[in-house]
Image (cartoon, grey):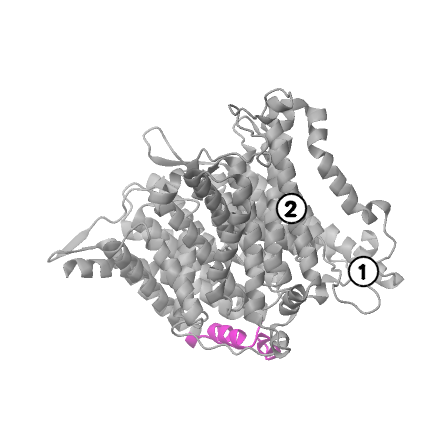
């Protein structure tokens, strides 16, 4: 294929070489100072510098060769494939689905229910702790947050960059109310959600008249204000020190997971004392919360309010002319999303046993929003896949000890976590701007349900 | 009274820096209607470029005149960050032009995360202090004005004048204004829209680089996460002045600088960022067009 194209375009190789050299030069200019030179503090605490020409050469070479290959080989190949496909006239969408594809949800659910026990079977009791806690619970928290935000961004089309504020409200409500009044987790979980929902209404009321981008910035501002208040209002929140020793969740008040308690869960069931049982319990709690979020989202989409949200996302002016009260519609979406953020927050506080403003920085909001958008807005499955890939992938990076053998003992993979996360956001957006799952199942349809390509739906003007 | 005037001077200095960064936000928003979230990190890159050039020059040429040093820092920093922003626009924003509205915003957020972490990885997470470059201080009565404050304000004024000249008197500026008003029509009339947008990004980055270098000179320290808070403040400035309006960006920058320094002086330092964010929310809610912005008409 390539040779044929080369005949058509005799200058292709020359062009590829030219582009490659150009990309190398640009990369040299960009990285000369930031990669080629390292600044560090010497023993006298003076800032000094040394050169890293080798690393710079690697960066430049990657850019040049990458560009050369893209222009010379990958792009012509892709173009010719696209051309061949267009000529053959076969549509990409087919109704035939594989067994796995058809039963994906059931398989995924079954796997999730068995997951903690599988982890225990494979890695032993203490070994499974990491897999249940760091991977299972961590990813599910993000799934829940992303599904909550999906109601605001994916369904109602309101861009919210301060979602983490509601997460913080939920976490601090649980932490403060349980520390000061001794309320239990199961009482405070709904309460935290309701409080976060109230905050959603309070913050949402003035800002929801705004257009998309402006709304995004105002929500960002509110998110930061809440974080700054948490830092500075030290009498109540203990500032940056955070609140520690938050009560654990109990097994619906029947058994406790505190080690000293008389009705300790492990003792009552004759299990060896290990924190892994608490983690498994938490895993099922967050799984149930996730399923609740998904269920509510799916049901709401079929209700008039859910349809109003989606109509609002598609065209606000048309909505208004059809008599939909846009302010109330937006407010319910905002409050519902906030409520799920609050649930997730109180769960987070119970799981962590410690909350501090550090956990509620803007970056978290960006990560949650990124998961929603990368998953394909509005698609619950896509968002869950995105959460697994993005959060699980970055967690996996922590585990990559073998990289130390490749890059030397100073290499700490954690440092590259957010760098890779940022780059992944860009790359996924460039290649799949509609997210992993780009097609939508319409909620309202005539006669039969047909898959709608993502490019026919749009995200509202806010 | 002297205390008040002192705070005014401090606010003016800070406001000049914010104003320069705000221009980058407002120009990009005006021309392609996108919030360039990574612009704050471009500002941070500018600061780091200045820092590294400073270290190299002072170690090779001991006793180099400060004026020459500053000039080289600014020029190399401007070129370097201009190159960065040009590449970023080419790679991350241009392919998504015409895609759905959220896509460029998401890549911009991703770019912001990637840039600050790139600097953290390559230059280390610790704060980088440099010695004071300009130490002269003038006393007028009880008032203390340092030479670096004067320098910042003067450099800002010169740059703004140059910038105003480019936008209003050159063919390039005409192309920019045409593209801002109607991209399709401008393209039909022979304006190279892609090139104009690229140059807009380079110009915005150059101003941010100068702001970054002056921020470094003013505070004497650079850090990889310097981009976020000043970036949001500069964005607030752009919104306050009316996004899309160049004089508005400068005015907004000065106002934000003044509000910040007066708030810290008379109310509380701890809540100074809350004040900025509060103003941002307040302006957007009650006057989304800002002080000098044009009202936007929503069309079907």
Q: Do residues under tags 1 and 2 come within 8 Å of each other at their CB atoms? A: no
Quarter in which the C terminus of chain B is drawn = bottom right
Magenta-tinted stretch: B168-192
Residue A462 colored magenta?
no
Gap in angstroms between the C-alphas marked 1 and 2: 55 Å
**Of the pair A348 and B96, the residue shown nearer to us:** A348
* Mark 2 nearby-residue class (10 Å; few <14, some 14–19, many ≥20): many
**Looking at the rendering, which quadrant does residue A414 occupy?**
top right
Q: Which chain is home to disc 2?
A: A
Identify the secondary structure beneath mark 1. helix
- Label 1 sits on residue: A8
Residue A119 at least partly seen: yes
Mark found first going from the N terminus, 1 or 2: 1
Question: Residue A80: image x %, image y %?
Answer: 81, 57
- Label 2 sits on residue: A290
In front: label 1 or label 2 = 2
**Of the pair B42 and A173, the residue shown nearer to us:** A173
Residue at (84% x, 59% y) in the render: A85
Secondary structure character of the magenta stretch overall: helix
């Amino acid at each position: 294929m390539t040779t044929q194209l080369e005949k058509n375009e005799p200058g292709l190789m020359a062009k590829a070489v030219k582009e490659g050299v150009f990309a190398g030069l640009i990369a040299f200019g960009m990285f000369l100072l930031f990669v080629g030179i390292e600044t560090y503090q010497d023993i006298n605490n003076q800032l000094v510098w040394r050169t890293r020409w080798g690393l710079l050469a690697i960066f430049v070479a990657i850019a040049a060769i990458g560009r050369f290959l893209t222009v010379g080989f990958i792009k012509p190949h892709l173009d010719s494939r696209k051309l061949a496909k267009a000529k053959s006239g076969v549509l990409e969408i087919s109704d035939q689905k594989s067994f796995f594809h058809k039963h994906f949800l059931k398989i995924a659910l079954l796997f999730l229910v068995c997951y903690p026990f599988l982890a225990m079977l494979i890695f032993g009791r203490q070994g499974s702790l990491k897999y249940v806690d760091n991977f299972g619970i961590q990813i599910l928290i993000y799934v829940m947050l992303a599904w909550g935000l999906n109601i605001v961004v994916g369904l109602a089309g309101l861009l919210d960059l301060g979602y983490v504020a509601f997460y913080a409200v939920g976490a601090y409500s649980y932490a403060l109310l349980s520390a000061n009044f001794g309320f239990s987790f199961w009482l405070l979980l709904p309460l935290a959600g309701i409080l976060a929902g109230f905050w959603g209404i309070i913050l949402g009321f003035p800002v929801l008249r705004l257009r998309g981008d402006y709304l995004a910035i105002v929500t960002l501002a509110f998110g930061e204000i809440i974080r700054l208040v948490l830092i500075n209002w030290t009498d109540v929140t203990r500032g940056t020190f955070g609140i520690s020793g938050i009560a654990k969740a109990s097994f619906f008040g029947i058994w406790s997971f505190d080690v000293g308690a008389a009705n300790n869960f492990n003792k009552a069931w004759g299990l060896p004392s290990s924190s892994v049982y608490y983690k498994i319990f938490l895993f099922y709690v967050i799984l149930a919360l996730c399923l609740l979020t998904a269920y509510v989202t799916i049901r709401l989409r079929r209700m008039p309010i859910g349809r109003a949200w989606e109509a609002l996302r598609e065209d606000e002016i048309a909505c208004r002319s059809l008599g939909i009260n846009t302010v109330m519609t937006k407010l319910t979406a905002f409050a519902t999303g906030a409520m799920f953020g609050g649930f997730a927050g109180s769960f987070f506080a119970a799981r962590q046993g410690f909350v501090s403003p550090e956990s509620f920085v803007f970056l978290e909001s960006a990560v949650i929003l990124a998961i929603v958008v990368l998953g394909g807005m509005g698609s619950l499955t896509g968002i869950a896949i995105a959460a697994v890939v993005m959060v699980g992938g970055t967690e996996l990076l922590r585990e990559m000890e073998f990289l130390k053998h490749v890059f030397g003992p100073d290499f700490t993979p954690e440092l590259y976590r957010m760098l890779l996360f940022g780059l992944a956001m860009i790359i996924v957006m460039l290649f799949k701007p509609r997210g992993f799952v780009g097609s939508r199942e319409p909620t309202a349809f005539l006669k039969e349900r047909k898959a709608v390509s993502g490019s026919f739906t749009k995200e509202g003007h806010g | 009274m002297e205390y008040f005037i002192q705070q005014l001077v401090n606010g003016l200095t800070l406001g000049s820096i914010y104003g320069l960064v705000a221009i980058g936000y407002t120009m990009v928003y005006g021309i392609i209607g996108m919030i360039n979230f990574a612009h704050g990190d471009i500002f941070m890159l500018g600061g780091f470029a200045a820092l590294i050039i400073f270290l190299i020059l002072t170690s090779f040429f001991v006793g180099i005149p400060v004026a020459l040093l500053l000039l080289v820092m600014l020029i190399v920093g401007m070129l370097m960050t201009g190159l960065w922003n040009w590449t970023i626009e080419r790679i991350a924003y241009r392919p998504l032009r015409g895609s759905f509205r959220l896509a460029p915003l998401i890549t911009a957020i991703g770019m912001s995360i990637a840039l600050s972490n790139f600097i953290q990885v390559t230059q280390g997470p610790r704060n980088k202090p440099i010695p004071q470059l300009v130490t002269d201080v003038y006393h007028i009565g009880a008032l203390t004005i340092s030479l670096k404050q004067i320098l910042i304000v003067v450099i800002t004024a010169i740059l703004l004048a140059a910038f105003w000249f480019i936008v209003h008197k050159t063919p390039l500026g005409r192309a920019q204004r045409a593209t801002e008003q109607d991209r399709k029509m401008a393209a039909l009339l022979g304006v190279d829209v892609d090139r104009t947008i690229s140059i807009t990004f380079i110009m915005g980055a150059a101003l941010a680089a100068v702001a970054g270098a002056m921020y470094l000179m003013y505070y004497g320290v650079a850090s990889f996460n310097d981009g976020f808070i000043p970036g949001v403040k500069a964005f607030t400035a752009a919104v306050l002045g009316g996004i899309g309006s160049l004089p508005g960006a400068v005015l907004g920058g000065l106002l934000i600088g003044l509000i910040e320094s007066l708030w810290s002086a008379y109310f509380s330092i701890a809540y100074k960022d809350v004040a900025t964010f509060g103003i941002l929310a307040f302006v957007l809610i009650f006057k989304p067009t800002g002080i000098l912005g044009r009202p936007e008409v929503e069309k079907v």
